[in-house]
Image (cartoon, rainbow, N blue to C red):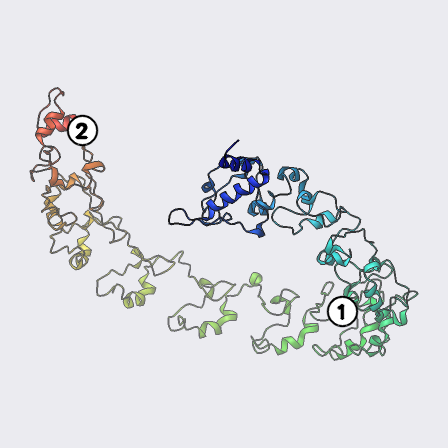
């Protein structure tokens, strides 16, 4: 028989199995909550508002891969789960930001619900009335619908005008909760209140309770779009309220005549007085629908003369006075049907002289005074067109007498120049033409005497240059032409003496450069031409001496670069040419425009100032002989001399 201890053991073993599980749970719990050593480990908690914990059976056993801290709902900051790569389903829009538990929870496998589409997770508030293709109206960013106008245009009632801004529930009651039951498309189904308020005209009284689209359009209720083809509305009629013409609600059988509405306008018109003048009431004969002003009567078909209607206009005209001047009443001779102003008399067929009608104009003309000057009254001699009196031009074609026969007064009064004081002949035609007095030009053809015969005063008064003081000869034609005094050019052809014979003063006064102090020779023609003193150019042809013979001062003063300090030779022609000093370019056989030799001074290589044909390479700090000897150990005929360096490296490179 087993001892007591053994008995207790078996009694424990024989105890109900659930007691063992309770004992085991107590032990595990105790192990979690009791202190281990000196430190207590609190139990990790879970936020109940997050729902039940997703089973982690297939997750890695290392919790720290995802969690951190003392709660399970805190994920690591660097936690990242590539949903597309790990599951084959890439998340977009709001789905990408949703918490995992929104899809992965105790409802079951997320894949089962995903196969149902949107309705697998989202309640269909439309109750299936709009189908199961949520994406036709919604996207994955939010629930706000988009593209509903385009979809609505596929229905019986496309949304245009003001309808595009109307909330859905205004036509579809219950749309707020997804009820889009079929709605009627007739206007009156939604616009009964507008129909009740329409009193101008009163739609209900007139029986206008259907077919609103006959007059209205979806953009606005006002300015109805009724097809007024029986009486097209144009001009000012477009903006007129219907009841101004359709009084007392009468919309049929109205007259189309203007005077049916505008009789008061007709009777009250005073400019002109339509009633007193016996105008017909056919307003449209002169007026249009745009404006009463600017009426234009169409004269087409009128066979009677203008005075039949315009006799009062004829008798009241004062500029000119038609009655006093005995004008005929055939208004159409001068006027047209567009305007009274700007009348133009048609002179076609008039055989009598102008003075027959225009003798008063002849007598009153003062510029010039036709009567005082004894002008003949045959106006057409000077006034050669019938359009205007101004701009008269006398036709000299048949005039045989000299100009002074008529123009002696103009001759006597001319002061610039004074013809009388200067003793000008009275043959005006020698200088003037028949077009204008101004711009007279004397024809020198046939004049054989010298210019000074007439122009000695001009010669004596000329100061730039002073002809008298400078001893100029009086044969003006040597420098001047017959067109103008200005711009005189002396013709040097045939001059055999040197320039200095006449121009020694210019030579002595020249300071840039100073010809006297510089010792320039007086053969001006060596540098100057006969066209102008400026821009002198010395002709170096035939010069055999070096430049420094004449230009040693230029050499000594050159400082960019300083020729003396740099040890430049005085053979200027090595760098300069005879056109100009600046822009020098030395033809250097060894390249110095690029690479390590760029921007070196001449003396850096040419160590002998007086001999630039010799250059040194071996003195450079980069070319020490031991180093170069080692580098050229396998080079035939290598020597440590500069000429050898240049022979092998003519371009300054390897």
Near-viewer residue (631 or 389) = 631
Which quadrant holds residue 387? bottom right
Residue 112, image x and y in percent? 65, 37
Q: Is residue 332 left or right of residue 7?
A: right
Residue 291's disc number: 1
Near-viewer residue (458 or 154) = 154
**Residue 55 visible, this orientation:** no
Q: Circle 1 — which element?
A: loop
Residue 77, image x and y in percent? 45, 47
Q: Residue at x 18, y 58 (%)?
A: 510
Near-viewer residue (594 or 79) = 79
Disc 2: which residue: 650
Residue 197, image x and y in percent? 82, 69
Up the image or down, 429 lies above or below 185; here it is below
Task: Specify which label sits upstream in the sequence, 2 or 1.
Answer: 1
Q: Residues within 10 Å of mark 1 (few under 14, many from 20)?
A: few
Q: Circle 2 — which element?
A: loop
Up the image or down, 535 lies above or below 425; here it is above
Which quadrant holds residue 369? bottom right
Which residue is situated farthest in the front direction here? 1
Q: Is residue 212 left or right of residue 534?
A: right
Q: CA distance from mark 2 to mark 1?
A: 97 Å
């Amino acid at each position: 028989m087993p001892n007591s201890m053994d008995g207790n053991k078996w009694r424990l073993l024989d105890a109900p199995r659930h007691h063992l599980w309770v004992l085991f749970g107590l032990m595990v719990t105790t192990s979690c909550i009791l202190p281990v050593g000196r430190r207590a480990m609190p139990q990790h908690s879970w936020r109940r508002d997050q729902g039940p914990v997703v089973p982690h059976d297939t997750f890695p056993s290392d919790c720290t891969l995802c969690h951190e801290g003392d709660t399970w709902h805190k994920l690591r900051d660097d936690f990242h789960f590539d949903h597309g790569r790990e599951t084959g389903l890439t998340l977009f829009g709001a789905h990408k930001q949703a918490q995992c538990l929104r899809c992965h929870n105790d409802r079951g496998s997320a894949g089962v619900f995903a196969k149902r589409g949107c309705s697998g997770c989202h309640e269909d508030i439309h109750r299936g009335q709009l189908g199961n293709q949520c994406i036709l109206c919604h996207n994955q960013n939010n629930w706000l619908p988009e593209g509903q106008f385009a979809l609505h245009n596929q229905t019986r009632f496309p949304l245009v005008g003001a309808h595009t801004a109307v909330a859905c529930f205004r036509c579809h009651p219950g749309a707020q909760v997804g009820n889009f039951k079929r709605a009627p498309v007739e206007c009156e189904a939604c616009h009964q209140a507008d129909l009740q308020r329409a009193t101008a005209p009163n739609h209900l009284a007139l029986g206008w309770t259907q077919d609103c689209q006959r007059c209205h359009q979806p953009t606005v209720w006002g300015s109805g779009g009724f097809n007024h083809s029986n009486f097209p509305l144009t001009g000012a009629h477009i903006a007129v309220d219907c009841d101004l013409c359709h009084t007392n609600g009468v919309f049929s059988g109205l007259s189309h005549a203007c005077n049916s509405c505008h009789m008061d306008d007709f009777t009250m018109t005073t400019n002109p007085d339509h009633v007193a003048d016996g105008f017909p009431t056919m307003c449209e004969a002169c007026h249009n629908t745009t404006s009463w002003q600017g009426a234009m009567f169409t004269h087409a078909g009128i066979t009677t003369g203008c005075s039949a209607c315009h006799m009062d206009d004829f008798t009241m005209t004062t500029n000119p006075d038609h009655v006093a001047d005995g004008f005929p009443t055939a208004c159409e001779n001068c006027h047209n049907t567009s305007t009274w102003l700007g009348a133009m008399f048609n002179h076609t067929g008039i055989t009598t002289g102008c003075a027959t009608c225009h003798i008063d104009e002849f007598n009153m003309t003062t510029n010039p005074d036709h009567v005082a000057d004894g002008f003949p009254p045959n106006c057409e001699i000077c006034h050669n067109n019938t359009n205007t009196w101004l701009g008269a031009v006398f036709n000299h074609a048949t005039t045989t007498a000299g100009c002074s026969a008529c123009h002696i007064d103009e001759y006597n009064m001319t002061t610039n120049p004074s013809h009388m004081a200067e003793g000008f002949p009275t043959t005006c035609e020698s200088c003037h033409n028949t077009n204008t007095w101004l711009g007279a030009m004397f024809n020198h053809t046939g004049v054989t005497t010298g210019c000074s015969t007439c122009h000695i005063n001009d010669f004596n008064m000329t100061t730039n240059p002073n002809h008298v003081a400078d001893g100029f000869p009086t044969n003006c034609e040597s420098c001047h032409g017959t067109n103008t005094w200005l711009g005189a050019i002396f013709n040097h052809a045939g001059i055999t003496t040197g320039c200095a014979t006449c121009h020694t003063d210019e030579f002595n006064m020249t300071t840039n450069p100073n010809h006297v102090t510089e010792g320039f020779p007086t053969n001006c023609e060596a540098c100057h031409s006969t066209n102008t003193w400026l821009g002198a150019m010395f002709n170096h042809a035939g010069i055999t001496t070096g430049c420094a013979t004449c230009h040693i001062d230029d050499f000594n003063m050159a400082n960019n670069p300083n020729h003396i300090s740099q040890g430049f030779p005085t053979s200027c022609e090595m760098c300069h040419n005879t056109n100009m000093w600046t822009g020098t370019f030395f033809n250097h056989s060894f390249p110095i425009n690029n690479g390590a030799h760029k921007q070196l001074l001449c003396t850096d290589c040419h160590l002998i100032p007086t001999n630039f044909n010799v250059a040194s390479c071996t003195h450079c700090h980069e070319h020490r002989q031991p180093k170069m000897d080692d580098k050229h150990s396998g080079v035939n005929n290598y020597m440590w001399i500069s000429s050898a360096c240049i022979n092998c490296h003519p371009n300054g490179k390897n």
